[in-house]
Amino acid sequence: MAELDIGKHCQVDSCNLKDFLPFVCDSCGGVFCLEHRSRDAHSCSEASVKRESHTVGDSALYPCSFEDCKGKELLPVICPQCEKHFCLAHRHQDDHKCEKLEVQKPRMTATKELVQKIIESKDGSKSKVRRGAKNSATAAKVALMKLKMHAAGDKGLPQTERTYFQVYLPKDSKTSNQPMFFSSKWSVGKVVDCAASLASLKNNNNVLTAKKLRLCHPQTGDALRMDDTLVSLLAHPESPLYNGGNLILEYLDNECTGLEDVTEYITHT
């Protein structure tokens, strides 16, 4: 399973800290960690600070922008968020009710919430797979009787061992699919050999450099392991095969682990 890519690195060169809940500067658009989120902390190149001042004699006074405050300072005291002047008593965001004050959640709590959302989204995907599997089981039961009438296979197999599938053939085959039956005791490798023979397909699985004829799962597209048995796959707890269901046969490169899109073979699974 691919690793989750959460968070981004602070764009201050000397920092580069990976923050799971990074801050975006609304002036330069850069991404920064908690320590460098203010414009002054990351030396924002786009921040235009207006330094309003009142001159009294030879001294410049900087009036406080807080409502009804008459305070003035000899030196500018500028809020790095709203960029307004304040007196020492109102210099903090809480004190002057800064219009850009962000109430931060505890960072660990916020991170847990983010991870929980990701987990819930994956659980939702699993639920869809389960619903798809339930629909496939029902469809397989309906299709089984028809498959028993037309399926090709080893006539010497006992009826109790026969397992029936609609086998979807490689894309370049003359026919798209063919009903077949195999022994539930057979390995996937033996099923592939039998299916290739029944469908008159080239089987170069014993040639090291050749593409391999592989049996793939009709819902997930995963290539089935050659040493697994049908009976174990029929009893798989999460994504089982079904007697009367579908299978996909395709030529895959040696490093390929399955099919990207099963709908290219099966319209409804």
Image (cartoon, grey):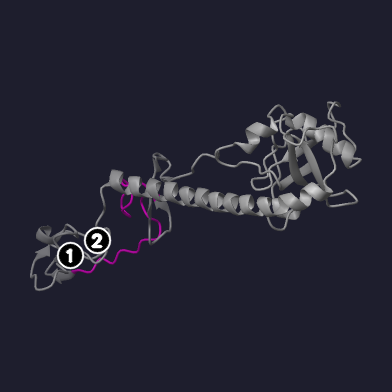
The quarter of the displayed image where residue 213 is located: top right
Q: What's the residue at 72%, 29% (across, down)?
A: 185
Residue assigned mark 1: 97
Q: Is residue 256 left or right of residue 80?
A: right
Using the image as rendered, state which of residue 30 and residue 252 is in the foreground. 252
Residue assigned mark 2: 101
Q: Is residue 61 above or below residue 103?
A: below
Span of residues in magenta = 32-53
Q: Is residue 113 shown in magenta?
A: no
* Farthest-out residue, front: 159
What's the residue type where badge 1 is placed?
A: Lys
User: Is label 1 in contact with label 2 (beta carbons under 8 Å)?
Assistant: yes
Q: Is residue 174 left or right of residue 132?
A: right
What's the residue type where badge 2 is placed?
A: Leu
Whole-percent x, y for residue 82 in the image:
27, 64
Whole-percent x, y for residue 177 in the image:
82, 50
Q: What's the residue at 71%, 55% (across, down)?
A: 263
